[in-house]
Amino acid sequence: MAKRIAVLSDTHGLLRPEVLDAISGCDAIIHGGDINKLEILDRLREVAPVYVVRGNNDKEWAENIPATLTFQIEDCRFFLVHNKKEVPKDLTGIDAVIFGHSHKYFEQTIDGRLWLNPGSCGRRRFDQEITLAMLTVEGKAVSVQKITIQP
């Protein structure tokens, strides 16, 4: 059965009510780092299980959160990291790469592999869009829906 997965990043200490509405009822949440507060993760875990990596702004409180994470949902293998520059060259067996850091939404399939940055749904910078993504994962197949929050 298909799984509905919320993908967010760069919340920077702000979990907007509109984001909570958008992710309500999802099966899992992927967070690409720069969380900035443990309370954000606690709140997200009330919604669904959370896969998370530490971002460059996640300091002492986040020392037990890994810098990278490989995991599987359905038959799809994910690699999660905050900064795209830290993605390893060898991605054998990985179906989707998720990252954050730039605050800019990015979605592209390269060599049959999904590359996704959900953008930032936290504090707004430089008039950039406030975005997250919703994945539908069924077996190995992944479809992506971009969600834009109006400031």
Image (spheres, grey):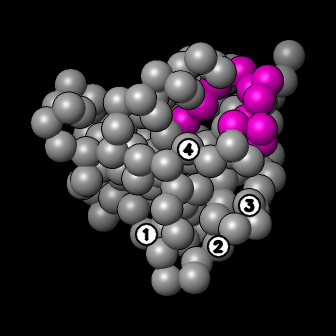
Query: Most extreme residue toward the bottom, as rendered?
Result: 126
Report which residue position mark 1 lands on. 102
Name the spot of residue 60 as percent of width and height, x first: 13, 36
Report which residue position mark 4 lands on. 15
The front one of 110 and 11 is 11
Badge 3 element: strand
Badge 2 element: loop
Q: Which residues are magenta?
A: 20-30
Which residue occupies 53% across, 25% down? Answer: 43
Report which residue position mark 3 lands on. 149
Q: Earlier in the sequence, mark 2 or mark 3?
A: 2
Q: Earlier in the sequence, mark 4 or mark 3?
A: 4
Q: Amino acid at mark 4?
A: Leu
Q: CA distance from mark 2 to mark 1?
A: 12 Å
Screen quadrant of the C terminus: bottom right
Q: Amino acid at mark 2?
A: Glu
The front one of 134 and 78 is 134
